[in-house]
Amino acid sequence: MSEISWKRTISDVNDEVLINLERPHKAFYLALTVSITCLLIAVGMVCYHVAVGNGMWKGFAPPAYWLVDITNFVFWVGIGHAGTLISAILFLFRAQWRNTVNRSAEAMTIFAVICAAVFPGIHMGRLYLGAYWALPLPNTNNLWVNFRSPLFWDVCAISTYFTISLLFWYIGLVPDLASIRDRVKGVKRLVYGLMSLGWRGTARQWHHYETGYGFLAALATPLVLSVHSIVSWDFAMALQPGWHTTIFPPYFVAGAILSGCAMVYTLLLPVRWMFKLENYIREDHLEACIKLTLLTSTIVFYAYGIEFFVAWYSGNVYEWAIFEKRAVGPYAFYFWVMTFCNCFFPLVWWSKRMRYNKAVSFVVCVLINVGMWFERYNIIISSLIEDFLPGSWGHAEPGLWEIGLTIGSFGLFFTFFLLFCKFFPIISLSEIKLIMDKPMKNSIKGGH
Amino acid sequence: MNQSKGVLALFQHLDTFCEVIEKVKSRNDFKDHEFYSPTSYHEVEHACAYAPSPVRWFTFFGAMLGTITGFALPLLCDWDWPVVVGGKTAGIYSLPAYVVIGFEFTILFGGIATVLGILVMSRLPNPKVKVLDPRLTDDLFGVFVPDVTLDGPQAKFLKDHGAIELKATN
């Protein structure tokens, strides 16, 4: 990315970025109303679900069972990947553009993981026993949990990922919350004061903070790559044709980063306009995000191709049968939507003009997220619906309840995100100051 | 910091501030002084020349504790209730499967310990914090010297070295 010439100085940052704490744009209220409505519909559906039981699920029959639940789970965990990737890996690479988008990407991660956790929660049925089942406690027969199961690894991975992402996000917020505390009065001052933990911004505090932040980034980096690898093992460790393949971990990680980056762009573009942050989240920063999305899209494209090649080249007839069905069988619709959205549409971004065209990029990012949902559905349904017992083979499509809960999870996600945008700094105040021109007597260009 | 009585000098420019830091550190009459910065400029860190932060030890020991816990948990459970795996004798521990749990616990404990390290070393949480000047978390740098007055030599030194504002705090 070329050097950006800043029209603002560090003195403008707090005044202009914290505009979100004041009265927001009308579009904000509209978006919040829509999100809360979707969320309330889903809450009603979950209540009904808990009352009548799992039978209401159209897909909830052998052998499909999880179907949309697990699709949503994998989809949301994938969305959550970009946040920590941007905040940790790009921090270690000193990619300057991450300083403008990391805060909202991290918030997105946390909310996406919450959305993901909702689905196993609902699926387990008795929610109040969820913690008991998830924790390594002996069951009623005094047996310990199966530590060899990828499902338990997944519990470890997702809970670690959530905790570390939350800590990373919060520790990054502390100096900014102190900035807000020093600007507001009354109850707000008390609340932000408590949240900022009494941060003062002394050089010694910054010294410990920077050291710790670097270590957190270093710890979170392998975590980002491990989490979706472990999610992929939920499938790859099973002997099911179509799932039992070694390409799954890198393929899932690339897919997760693809969907996450696309979601970052989808969220940032309206937020940037709504809160007038054009001077901070610059077009070059958005373009850098698009480049990362394009890169991961090509990796995913390669993975789709190699998956088919290996299925054919291995000579395994069962594996090939699944892949044949994916492309031309009863679920071909999902396959082709996935292929076009994730592989072909992003190709427009090879043109620089298109990368800077916000309308086109926004539409392609939305399509990628549609494609990534379809990808998970396609992988899950094609292998799950035809297991080793031909007598149980069938056909499943998402029903009203599944679609309703999926929309509801988007409602939950956007509600959380919009509330975050209203009450917290959308851009990291302290980190954006680092990439702006330094306040020197003899002014020089900024840099980290 | 519990003491807030003293003199606060505010600076606008990073280079001026860094020069002041180096000079203040070499003088003896700036006891218990503190430097304030709106963000973590590396120039300030270099000028302060602090010893490496002990936060790294929190990370190291936290991560090590995590590794030990992550492996101990499944191994002790195996020991408590041996399960036949893959038709082999009970008591043969399947370590490769536990690498995942060991890894996740390493990251989890290491991360939590790092945050605790930041909080402990930065003396946080500090609910009784006294904000010396709201601009210190915005765009100005500051030097705070406790137990001195505006007419003392310290205040004069700071003024002479580019402070844009001097104020007595209490």
Image: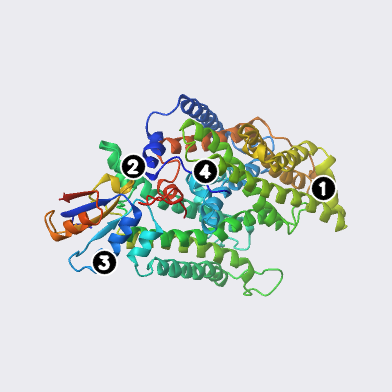
Tag shown at residue B170: none
Scheme of image coloration: rainbow
Q: Quadrant of residue A142?
A: bottom right
- What chain does mark 1 sit on? A
Circle 2: element type: helix
- In the image, residue A37 above or below residue A74: above
Q: Are circles 2 and 4 on residues that touch, CB within 8 Å?
A: no
Q: Amino acid at mark 3?
A: Lys
Q: Which residue is mark 3?
A: B25
Report the residue at 71% width, 51% height from top: A299
Q: Position of residue A250 (x, y in %)?
A: 68, 56
How many residues crowd mark 3 within 10 Å: few (<14), some (14–19), many (20+)? some
Q: Looking at numbered disc 2 in the image, what kind of residue is underneath it?
A: Ile
Sequence-wise, the earlier of marks 4 and 1 is 4
Gap in Å between the C-alphas at discs 4 and 1?
Answer: 33 Å
Foreground of the two, B6 or A37 = B6
**Mark identifier at residue A108:** 4
A87 left or right, relative to A297? left
Q: Secondary structure at mark 1?
A: helix
Marks 2, 1 in one chain: yes
User: Which is in the foreground here, disc 2 or disc 4?
Assistant: 2
Closer mark to the observer between disc 2 and disc 1: 2
When the figure is inspected, residue A412 is found, relative to residue B33, above or below; the finding is above
Q: Mark 3: which secondary structure?
A: helix
Q: List the residue tagged with mark 1.
A: A323
- Under mark 1, the amino acid is Phe
Residue B61, above or below A360: below
